[in-house]
Image (spheres, rainbow, N blue to C red):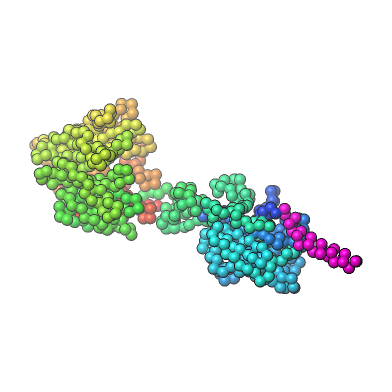
Amino acid sequence: MLALRCLLLSLMLLINSVQSWRACTDLLPLDLLDRALIRPGQAPPPQVQMVQSKGSRGLRLAGAAATALSFPASQIFTNCDFFPAEFSLVATIKIQRLKKRSEYLFSVLEEKSDSLVLGLSVSERRLHLLVSGPGSGARSRVSFKDVALDDNRWHTLVLAVSGHYATLTVDCGLPLELKQVQSFPSALSTRRSRIFIGSRRRLRGRFSGLIRQLVLLPGSDATSRLCPTPDPRLAELSVPRVLKATPIQTDQDPEFPFEAEARVTSGTRPLCSEPEGGQLWFNAQSRGLFICDGGRWRTLLHHQERLDYVEDHQDLYTSSETFDVEVFSIPSEGLFLAAANRDSRPGSGLYKWSNGSFVLYQNISTQEARAWKHFTIDGKAFLVVANSQEAEPELSVIFRWNQRRRRFLRHQTLETHSALDWESFSIHNSSFLVVANHRRDSNHNIQSVIYRWSPHAQLFEVNQTLSTSGAYDWEFFSVEPYHFLAVANTFDGKTTAISSTVYIWLSGRFQIFQSIPTLGATDWEAFQIHGRFFLAVANSQRVRERGPSLYSINSTLYELNTLTHSFIRFQDILTHSAVDWEFFTVGEEKFLIVANSHDGSSYSLNSVIYRWQGYEGFVAAHSLPTVGCRDWEHFSTEEEGSFLVYSSATSRLSKVLKLRTF
């Protein structure tokens, strides 16, 4: 009887020891990472860095921080000294590259002997669970093969263990199940042991990646708590508060050494999407620091460029003399340049920016083209050409970008008269085009036409006509709620000393706002500097009924006076048959460049860049040798920087120039 009682007592003690793990933690998730971190008022663990990578934070052990994240096992196993016989381990990690050697995510070691009680490690394409056996030095290993975790992306894995079975789920995908030869120990003692995060105490085997989450859930499989989820790579069971804080709110963070993953490039813009949110990018070329907000790069710090000098970048040979160039972009297609060529065969050329230069992309049939204008309506790209060849009837053409064929195709023809320019604009969600009709036969005093887009017909229809005298250019601009349209009148059949007109939009049509005296006006350029509005006119020549023509004359800048509600003379600049102004900026600096085309004896002249000097107005800064210069365009690319391109009306050679900054 006594022997039977002893046997029953032994069995009861064994059962209690086996089942006592259920009371160890009350089956609540145990955030091992949070317990290993600092407590309020304490110094941070040495050599532990908090890193922002691909929009999420993690911890990295640096240097010899093999014992930085650890704590006694008794802190979590408060009611008993046994590791749960059934449990889940949840880890969120990011590893750039793994070698064949193992790195420990988690380990339980005996304090005195340093023997391994339990460990979770990763190696190249494998995950290992190591458990001490019943005998001295005995150890069992469960290895999951073909598990790719070292792709420099965040992954959340759940390892669930119960009896003979171990199941691994990565990023809420299909579970991998392994049957162990030996069942997981039902009474794995943790007495006088210590739990280490990211190491096995010693430096060798230290985890080299980032750890964001490490949670022990006794008694059940944690997969059902995590999955499904919108972001399975970052599924959360319990993440320490310090790793969930908004990256910008660093004033609320603990005193951790902090770093954000940054990319240093020579100009190529990295991807910025939701996974890259919070990532920093340093652009070495522009010397700017940017942060990804999950959709686009926002400037944190940016070096303000200053123009140093201009250098030759590309000789652009066109099919014939070029009167105008138009630079524009088509989303998902790239940067283009349309050249308005004189000869009808093969017409004008469309060039595409590729590897830092323009290459011929498409030939478009034109008739002595004088200008191109690019515009968009409802996201669709258009090009309209001003054909000036005398014919019956004279037709200019609107081309529309065909997404399937990736070419501009003819969309609509409009009757024009020696057309020299088109301007596009929008007012109150309506799209307009206005043509500069220069002359009809020998008559320069004719009507130029404003067309309005008909959404129903998908065509432009006549909206208004305006009287012009040898119209050469139109310029649309807005000043707060008001919309203006300025025409450059060149010649009335007798003289170039005529007025050009600025119109204002009132009651659904354009009405005369101001007439400004000009001398063979060929271009208007509207721009704004620090809240001040300017108009620059290019005066080409003084032609009289008697006496020689004058080409070296003043072109004039006008400023809008808000008290008199008119444009008043601001500055005169000596030019030589000026045919174009182009306003552009480099950093905080403002510039105007003039196309000087002829001085009465030569077409080989310097075009001049003028820099804004405040009270002094625009001051000459750079002289650029040009031949028959007709048009200037400024453009920029994210990779190569800023450029100027000019067209030559006397040569097939146009040039692309690069703006060097410092």
Q: Quadrant of the N terminus?
A: bottom right
148 to 529, vertically: above or below:
below
360 to 122, vertically: above or below:
above
132 to 319, vertically: above or below:
below
Residue at x-position 69% and y-position 48%? 40
Q: How many marks?
A: 0
> Is any atom of residue 3 visible in this view?
yes
> Is any atom of residue 542 visible in this view?
no
Q: Answer with left or right where residue 396 lies relative to residue 623.
A: left
Name the spot of residue 399 as percent of width and height, x first. Answer: 23, 48
Q: Is residue 559 magenta?
A: no
State which region is magenta: 1-26
Foreground of the two, 128 or 304? 128
Farthest-out residue, top: 564
Farthest-out residue, right: 2
- Quarter residue 357 falls in: bottom left
Q: Is residue 5 magenta?
A: yes
Q: Answer with left or right where residue 273 lies relative to residue 31.
A: left
Name the spot of residue 210 as percent of width and height, x first. Answer: 58, 59
Q: Answer with left or right where residue 436 lies relative to residue 87.
A: left
Name the spot of residue 369 as percent of width and height, x first. Answer: 18, 48
Type of secondary structure dominating the magenta stretch = helix
- Quarter residue 569 falls in: top left
Residue at x-position 61% and y-position 67%? 178
Foreground of the two, 513 or 13? 13
Foreground of the two, 590 or 333? 333
Name the spot of residue 333 as percent of width and height, x first. Answer: 33, 54
Residue at x-position 30% and y-position 52%? 403
- Quarter residue 200 falls in: bottom right
Residue at x-position 68% and y-position 54%? 30
